[in-house]
């Protein structure tokens, strides 16, 4: 099969910033792309060879899209998996497979998957509704504090709450959910592993993630993570085992907690390019986006060694009322060494919307971190 400079079409469900960065690499390979997104002004809309507006959760929209391409992949996991399953049945290549996406879409299913495969994760209980959870509290089977997670549709910390008392319970929705033991976290790390159709896997070096305490959003990603070799080796083994058990094709981002007593616990996974891998564009020999393309085309994975350490700073909207995006003090960054800016191409800024990111590279990670933190203070996205 010829992929390059041919009629072979890659279909991408979702046209956001992850899709946009994927398209930069698909262009390098001269691959033909077709993207579907509900928003006609999505970041991919003016870069893909073909772009159509459609509902990613609509069975018919996804099938009609999938029938016209050779390989279907995703840049967001919130897609109609029944449609993907049908496309698989009629012989379309769907990477990652619908079965893996289905498990990952539901945090309750994810936890069951980890437990049944002997993969380390925090203790948990799944509940079909809020009444069942409250019943368990009354019976004394569940004790404060705990972490509540919505089974579906949570992202960027939106479906997660730490519940310390009865009052906190008022803030949670009545929907299928799970409750997790609150882990004493020393560090949060991420490992992105790629797996191609033949099962060849490769991990990117572990990174450290620092979150904003108020929004739960990733503020900084630091490459490499400051962890022992023993911990990183163990983290790579875990990431590869999950990818293999899910029969993944493509990237899998594995978010892990390192507890105060140095245990590694899986928090959650994402079956696609990930915010914790943006730095790979500048810091690693192969970027996560290049690696995703190689995986779904069953090409050999590229080397993932670090070319230069770095820190990735997310640029998120700070304006409470949605409006035309303004990048304040942006000129400040151009005087600083090792700075690479990525603007996603979203017309409107709103509170906590991911608008872009900046990666700062430096032979000395401490210098990159110093510059990254200065940039975070100075550069603001607002309206
Ligand atoms: P999302 O899917 O919205 O990104 P996560 O499940 O990753 O949500 O949780 C968001 C953040 O909440 C985590 O990065 C971590 O800081 C905190 N958190 C999640 N689960 C736990 C837990 N069991 N114990 C302590 N903190 C947690």
Image (cartoon, rainbow, N blue to C red):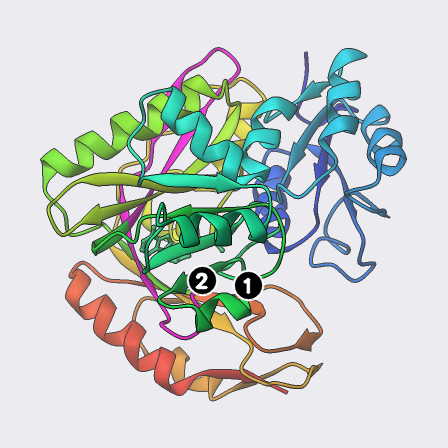
Residue at screen point 80% across, 58% down: 39
For the record, the magenta segment spans 189-217
Tag 1's secondary structure?
A: loop
Where, quadrant-wise, is the N terminus in this rendering?
top right
**The residue carrying mark 1 has its beta carbon less than 8 Å from ligand 1:** no
Q: Nearer the viewer, residue 320 or 113?
A: 113
The image's mark for residue 1 is none
Residue with the mark numbered 1: 172
In the visual, does 145 lie left or right of 197?
Answer: left
Q: Earlier in the sequence, mark 2 or mark 1?
A: 2
Residue 59, x across and y down, in percent: 84, 34
The residue depicted at 40 percent of the width and 38 percent of the height is 286
Find disc 2 in the rendering and name its residue: 161
Q: Is residue 62 above or below residue 372?
A: above
Taking the image as shown, residue 23 lies to the left or right of residue 242, namely right
Q: Residues within 10 Å of mark 2 (few under 14, many from 20)?
A: some
Within the magenta stretch, is there residue 72? no
Measuring from the top left, give residue 117's x and y in whole percent: 37, 20
The residue at 38%/40% (across/down) is 124
- Residue 74, given in percent of the width and then of the height, sits at 64, 37
The answer to whether the residue labelled 2 contacts the one labelled 1, judged by CB atoms less than 8 Å apart, is yes
Image coordinates of residue 344 in percent, x first then y, are 60, 63
Q: Quadrant of ligand 1?
A: bottom left
Q: CA distance from mark 2 to mark 1?
A: 8 Å
Q: Residues within 10 Å of mark 1 (few under 14, many from 20)?
A: some
Where residue 185 sits, quadrant-wise, is: bottom left
Q: Quadrant of residue 143?
A: bottom left
Q: Find the residue positioned furthest to the front.
A: 139
Q: Can residue 189 be seen in the rendering of this structure?
A: yes
């Amino acid at each position: 099969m010829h992929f390059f400079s041919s009629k072979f079409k890659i279909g991408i469900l979702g046209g956001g910033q992850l899709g946009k960065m994927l398209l930069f690499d698909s262009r390098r390979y001269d691959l033909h792309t077709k993207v579907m997104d509900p928003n006609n002004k999505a970041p991919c809309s003016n870069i893909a060879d073909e772009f159509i507006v459609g509902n990613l959760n609509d069975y018919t929209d996804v099938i009609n899209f999938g029938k016209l391409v050779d390989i279907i992949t995703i840049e967001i996991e919130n897609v109609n998996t029944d449609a993907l399953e049908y496309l698989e049945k009629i012989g379309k290549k769907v990477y990652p497979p619908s079965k893996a996406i289905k498990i990952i879409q539901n945090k309750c299913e994810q936890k069951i998957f980890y437990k049944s495969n002997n993969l380390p994760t925090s203790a948990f209980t799944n509940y079909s509704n809020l009444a069942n959870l409250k019943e368990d509290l009354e019976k004394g089977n569940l004790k404060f504090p705990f972490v509540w997670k919505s089974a579906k549709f949570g992202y960027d910390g939106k479906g997660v709450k730490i519940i310390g008392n009865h009052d906190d319970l008022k803030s949670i929705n009545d929907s299928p959910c799970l409750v997790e033991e609150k882990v004493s976290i020393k560090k949060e790390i991420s490992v992105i592993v790629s797996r191609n159709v033949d099962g060849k896997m490769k991990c990117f070096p572990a990174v450290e993630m620092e979150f904003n305490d108020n929004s739960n959003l990733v503020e900084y990603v630091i490459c490499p993570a400051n962890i022992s070799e023993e911990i990183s080796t163990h983290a790579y083994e875990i990431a590869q085992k999950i990818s293999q058990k899910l029969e993944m094709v493509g990237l899998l981002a594995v978010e892990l907690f390192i507890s105060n007593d140095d245990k590694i616990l899986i928090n959650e996974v994402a079956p696609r390019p990930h915010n914790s891998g943006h730095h790979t564009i500048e810091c690693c020999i192969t970027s996560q986006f290049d690696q995703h393309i190689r995986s779904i085309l069953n090409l050999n994975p590229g080397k993932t060694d670090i070319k230069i350490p770095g820190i990735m700073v997310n640029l998120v909207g700070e304006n409470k009322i949605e409006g035309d995006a303004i990048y304040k003090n942006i000129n400040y960054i151009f005087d600083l060494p090792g700075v690479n800016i990525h603007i996603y191409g979203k017309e409107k800024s709103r509170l906590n919307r991911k608008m872009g990111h900046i990666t700062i590279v430096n032979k000395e990670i401490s210098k990159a971190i110093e510059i990254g933190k200065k940039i975070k203070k100075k550069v603001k996205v607002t309206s």
